[in-house]
Image (tube, helix red, strand yellow):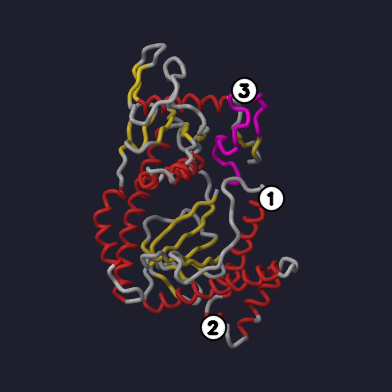
């Protein structure tokens, strides 16, 4: 399986200038190639092939007076920018044809030097990890890196990024084998919420840190200071970086919280089941700020890839499953309840339920049922996926989307 490892480099002034040139050249190649394909499409001409674009916009462009500065950066950076454009077009065409699951992917767009994120991609021909702890990048030099841990294997590619707050990051892609943890007997169903970030089926609650809410006072002050500066001035640029750094701190704290919570859950449970929430829809309601502050999607993605990495079972319960309406003791469906109802009593068996704990227990039972239905892929001796014997779907799950299928460690493509 492939994993990414991110580290902070600290380039000096000359290296920052070289990286800025690399970002700009990659952006120009992307925009030139995208413009050629758009113009060909508007004129009714065939799709321009990558080989032709590479010859026109990279090889021949370096010999012209207008684009001679493309030779100042590594050729790998320019070729990778063209490959990234090909990938963007492939994702767009697959989305139009229905071959790609998930949300629709739009057509590639032009890049700007004012974008909040600048990046270049390199293969092993243009970078190397030195023995003294630095990372050599072609035509940039040896970058000093703050190593927080060792790389488990030699990296296969490197992405250098600069965010809106001026920080640089090195993202290494490494091929590693799954780190299978010892088996345990416990399983967990998880109900995600706002008052409590997560409630587990065993009754444990993970409090919501509300990182954005806690930083709002300082963010408001900085935003007022930013709005009072003249556009285009150096003072406005300084305050803009202050605002970006404050938002970056909030995002870093949230990400750190997600990693620690998801790792603990995966280590403590052999199987983890979570509800597939419609976060994009909830992000358009009056609770939008709190929903985005919680970061449910990022947390669920971490649970999924860590389950694959450590050999745990992971399954998403369909969002249409009425986890808050069913009594986890007797199975009676008591009907929908408004959000202010946090505790309720079953009208059939008389059991007293905490709303979130009851929902987590129902998610656990439904996740077990999904796994027991036989919709789990395992691996044969050669490492190829083998599906278990077909089990007819029950009436209540007919037509459920494929994205709710559980995953197991080692499934290709995830």
- Disc 3 or 2, which lies upstream in sequence? 2
- Label 2 neighbourhood size at 10 Å, few (<14), some (14-19), many (20+)? some
Q: Name the residue under label 1.
A: 97
Residues in magenta, as a range = 387-414
Q: Which disc number belongs to residue 69?
A: 2
Judge from the rendering whether residue 399 lies leftward or rightward of residue 141; answer left or right.
Answer: right
Residue 399 lies in magenta, yes or no? yes
Label 3 to label 2, Cα distance in Å?
A: 64 Å
Tally the marks.
3
Q: Which residue is drawn at 44% across and 70% down?
A: 114
Q: Kindly give the residue lying farthest to the top in the view shown.
A: 349
Using the image, determine if residue 329 lies above or below residue 314: above
Q: Is mark 3 on a helix, strand or loop?
A: helix
Q: Residue 247 location in percent, x, y?
A: 34, 58
Q: Where is residue 153 in the image (x, y as percent from the top left)?
A: 50, 55
Numbered tag placed on residue 395 in the rendering: 3
Q: In this view, does 303 lie above or below 75?
A: above
Instruction: Report x, y in % for residue 242.
Output: 30, 65
133, 339: nearer the viewer: 339
Quick check: marks 1 and 2 in contact, CB under 8 Å?
A: no
């Amino acid at each position: 399986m492939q994993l990414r490892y991110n580290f902070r480099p600290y380039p000096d002034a000359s290296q920052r200038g070289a990286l800025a040139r690399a970002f700009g050249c990659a952006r120009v190649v992307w925009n030139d190639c995208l413009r050629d394909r758009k113009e060909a499409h508007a004129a009714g001409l065939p799709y321009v092939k990558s080989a032709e674009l590479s010859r026109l916009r990279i090889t021949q462009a370096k010999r012209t007076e207008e684009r001679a500065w493309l030779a100042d950066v590594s050729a790998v950076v320019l070729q990778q920018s063209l490959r990234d454009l090909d990938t963007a077009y492939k994702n767009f065409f697959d989305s139009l044809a229905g071959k790609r699951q998930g949300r629709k992917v739009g057509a590639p767009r032009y890049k700007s030097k004012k974008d909040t994120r600048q990046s270049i991609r390199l293969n092993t021909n243009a970078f190397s990890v030195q023995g003294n702890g630095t990372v050599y990048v072609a035509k940039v030099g040896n970058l000093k890196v703050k190593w927080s841990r060792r790389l488990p294997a030699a990296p296969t590619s490197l992405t250098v990024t600069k965010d809106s707050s001026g920080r640089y990051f090195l993202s290494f892609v490494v091929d590693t084998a799954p780190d299978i943890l010892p088996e345990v007997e416990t399983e967990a169903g998880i109900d995600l919420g706002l008052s409590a970030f997560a409630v587990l089926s065993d009754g444990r609650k993970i409090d919501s840190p509300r990182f954005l809410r806690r930083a709002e006072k300082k963010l408001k002050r900085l935003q007022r200071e930013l709005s009072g500066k003249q556009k285009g001035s150096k003072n406005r640029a300084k305050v803009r970086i202050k605002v970006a750094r404050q938002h970056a701190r909030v995002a870093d704290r949230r990400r750190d919280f997600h990693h620690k919570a998801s790792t603990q859950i995966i280590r403590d449970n052999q199987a983890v089941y979570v509800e597939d929430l419609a976060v994009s829809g909830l992000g358009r309601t009056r609770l939008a700020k709190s929903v985005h502050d919680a970061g449910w999607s990022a947390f669920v993605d971490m649970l999924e890839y860590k389950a694959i990495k450590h050999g745990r079972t992971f399954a998403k319960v369909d969002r249409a499953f009425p986890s808050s309406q069913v009594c986890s003791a007797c199975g009676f469906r008591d009907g929908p309840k408004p959000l202010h109802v946090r505790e309720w009593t079953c009208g059939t068996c008389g059991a007293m339920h905490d709303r979130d704990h009851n929902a987590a227990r129902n998610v656990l039972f439904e996740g077990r049922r999904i796994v027991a239905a036989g919709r789990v892929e395992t691996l044969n001796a050669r490492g190829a996926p083998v599906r278990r014997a077909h089990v007819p779907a029950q009436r209540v799950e007919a037509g459920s989307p494929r994205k709710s299928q559980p995953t197991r460690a080692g499934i290709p493509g995830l």
